Image (cartoon, rainbow, N blue to C red):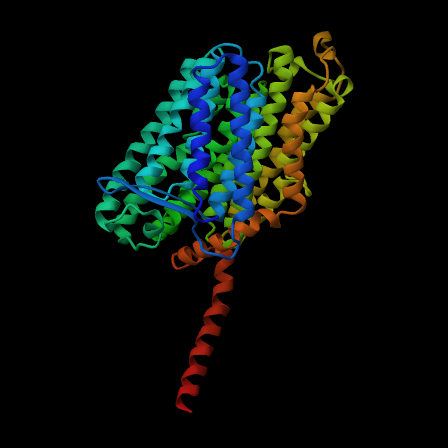
Amino acid sequence: MDDFPILSLMLLVPLVAGVACLFADARLARNLALAATLVDFALGILLWASFDIGGAQWQFVERAPLFAGFQWALGIDGIALMLIMLSVFLMPICILASASIEKRVGEYMAAFLLMEVLMIGVFAAQDLFLFYIFFEAGLIPMYLIIGIWGGQDRIYASYKFFLYTLLGSVLMLIAMLWMVNEAGTTDIPTLMAYDFDPRAQTWLWLAFFASFAVKMPMWPVHTWLPDAHVQAPTAGSVILAGVLLKMGGYGFIRFSLPMFPEASAQFAWLIFALSMIAVVVTSLIALVQHDMKKLIAYSSVAHMAIVTVGLFAFNVQGLEGSMIVMLSHGLVSGALFLCVGVIYDRLHTREIDRYGGLSINMPYYALFFLLFTMASIGLPGTSGFVGEFLSLAGIYQVSSWVALVCTTGIILGAAYMLYLYRRVAFGDQKNADAAAMPDLSPREWLMLAPIAAAVLWMGVYPESFLAPMREDIAALDARVARAAPLGDARLKLSEPTKNAGHAQDEHAAHGGAH
């Protein structure tokens, strides 16, 4: 299986289908897009089934020289595998969620298929500049999706999204050019093991941080996200929250931590400070929202802040928790945007006060919405609990204060999500048009049921998602351990360890004398 170019095939299928959609009528374009995304999902399942847990770190590697030292280099580890699976799982659901799109359907489907190519490319790229091309090109289809098929203020939102994300990436490109000149290679696995000068690491880390912080997005460069979500069509919001935000987290895992470990330790305080502010401030902002999409968008910033504190905890629990939070958030936030889209298609408003009592006339909808609300809060048995528990356990080893502040995000999360659910699903039916809305159609069942199953599967048996990533996370932890900052909780653990180390040294010295 390793000799079969499955990754290139996963890029080729949606690319060919996307080109075909440009020349097809609306119905054929929908069918082509759905077929192509289902084929890629099937290839993703084959990829997961063929992945050798405990085998080589990089599997399904494909290399072909192109020009001037530039190479076509693809390959995945367990971390990339899980994010590719998230991408190919959500894409057919996005196509199903696009039934309300009626203008320029062929171009719309082509944009989504191109997005799938670029997302898989980001997670599979093994060449520095190939990664950069995929990473930046992902802006283009999302910019078009918001700008052409978005809401009333779509032009403003699309420009804001494009400019924020592009400006951060210019610095990353300059840093990449310096790295290639210094290390003499564009190969990402080689660069991950290369020891850059600690003084240079500071500037390189800041250059990459400028791009990844905007992509996550971290506070205070998060302001493009609520606008983009509110104006994007439903499927655009799903893929933006589900996968595009994860590219920032993936960037920290693939570049910032392994390539610049000393600088990562040096700036861990900055990450903690920004993340703590994000958790509290954006949760409080979410509490006062009247627009359902804006509320979920602000909750995304708070959840992604849990990812960043877990990543910079410099321990296995924090890293594993961050990955599970990313996967869980991809599913849950995508599902919540779908839930908003379902009722928006019927009533054409996202105002929370226009609804109420939907559990009476839409009981199945209310049930799905409740499950995803509870998963967002982190109820045990759902995917949200596993990731947040691991992340907070990891950060507690470094700083109990940071863990305490981040835990308030879970309490505030329960406040705004339950407040949202109560106002939409329970209470009196004040509006006759909302009370007359029909329950889920078969197409909407097909959208929501697979995500519900995945959320429960991850919550009940997270080992199936952690197992492929465990060795890669352990390798990353070993790489950053030398630079790990000592926190208030870890300081207590370090003294006995040092004493034990001295005792072992003395024992070895006596043994040598004998």
In this view, the residue farthest toward the right is 360
**Within the image, what quadrant is residue 386 found in?**
top right
Q: Residue 365: x and y, percent? A: 71, 23
Horizontal arrangement in the rendering, residue 483 relative to residue 35 (left or right): left
Give whichever of 294, 249 is nearer the camera: 249
Quadrant of the drawing holding the C terminus: bottom left
In this view, the residue farthest toward the top is 432
Is 107 located above or below residue 126 in the figure?
above
Horizontal arrangement in the rendering, residue 281 relative to residue 429 (left or right): left
Is 104 located above or below residue 33 in the figure?
above
Is 132 located above or below residue 187 in the figure?
above
Horizontal arrangement in the rendering, residue 429 relative to residue 254 (left or right): right
**Within the image, what quadrant is residue 238 found in?**
top right
Give whichever of 72, 449 is nearer the camera: 72
- Residue 307 can be seen, yes or no: yes
Identity of the residue drawn at 41% across and 31% down: 118
Q: Residue 201: x and y, percent? A: 29, 48
Give whichever of 132, 266 is nearer the camera: 132
- Residue 299 can be seen, yes or no: no
Q: Residue 391: x and y, percent? A: 55, 47
Identity of the residue drawn at 58% across and 42% down: 407
Q: Residue 220: x and y, percent? A: 42, 31
Identity of the residue drawn at 36% across and 39% down: 209
Identity of the residue drawn at 61% across and 27% down: 336
In this view, the residue farthest toward the bottom is 514
* Total tally of numbered discs in the picture: 0
